[in-house]
Image (cartoon, rainbow, N blue to C red):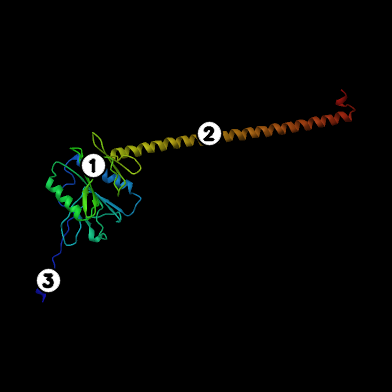
Amino acid sequence: MVQQLEKNQKPEIIYPDSDGKPMSDNTEQYKWIVIIKENLEIIFAAVAEVFIAGDLLWYPTEGSRKCQAPDVMVVFGRPKGKRGSYKQWLEEDIPPQVAFEILSPSNTKSEMSDKLRFYQSHGVEEYYIYDPDRLKLTGYQREGGSLKAIEKMNGWISPRLGIRFEMTKESLELYRPNGQRFLTSVELEEQVREAQERAAVAEDRAQQARAEKQQVQEQLQQTQEEKQQLQEQATEAKSRIQALEEILRRQGINLDDL
């Protein structure tokens, strides 16, 4: 009986969190992975149900160890958070809608064909490939049941992400929905530093304005006090004059007759 149960028991399938491959093969590939992932994180920072990952193994089907690790993937409808891998059956069966691949010299045509078939078979809606060495940008969009090549990528706006792709003679440029260019980590840090400096200058100016306002208010108060003193002195002088006139009248002297 025990032997029969052991025969019928399915072996446990292990889904590794790593495929043993490095995240990138060179600095240029790594730079682009970081730029795309971090800028997308910024764009969707306030949207709780958008999960973004870089080089994370994606297992579409329970019971199968077939997987891919997109350089960057975006999943709408799933919460942010830590994951060792993306097991789709544990994620309400929602596949990544957008995938990015940054090519390196080690990528083969066969490998990239396999990736395209995989993404096509498992529900990816938008798939973008950038080759920084050849300055080549390729995109696919799901039409019906398959991924179709996008004819013109220059100026293309992602339906899902709202970002714009622009190819220049030197490089790919990506733009956020608000029109701001995707920045490197160094550029983002510089932007933060400049913003902090501007804020500090603005605060200094505000403090100076408050101090000047306080000074004007104090001067105004001083002027009002001086005016009050002059009015009191004038009233006192008038009272003295009236008193002197009264004394003179008692003595039979009328100033109007002089």
Task: Name the residue type under label 3.
Answer: Asn
Task: Give the Cα distance between marks 3 and 1.
Answer: 48 Å
Looking at the image, which is closer to me, 126 or 68?
126
* Mark earlier in primary sequence (2, 1): 1
In the displayed structure, 240 sits above or below 73; it is: above
Which residue is label 2 attached to?
212
Task: Give the Cα distance between marks 3 and 2.
Answer: 86 Å
| Residue that sits furthest to the right in the current view | 252
Classify residue 113 as left or right of residue 37: left
Which residue is label 1 attached to?
32
Q: Residue 40 at what x, y percent from top left? A: 29, 46
Task: Name the residue type under label 1.
Answer: Trp
Q: Residue 189 at what x, y percent from top left? A: 32, 39
| Residue that sits furthest to the bottom in the current view | 1
Looking at the image, which is closer to me, 109 or 243?
109
Disc number at residue 8?
3
User: What element does badge 3 sit on?
Assistant: helix
Q: Residue 234 at what x, y percent from top left? A: 73, 31
Task: Name the residue type under label 2.
Answer: Glu
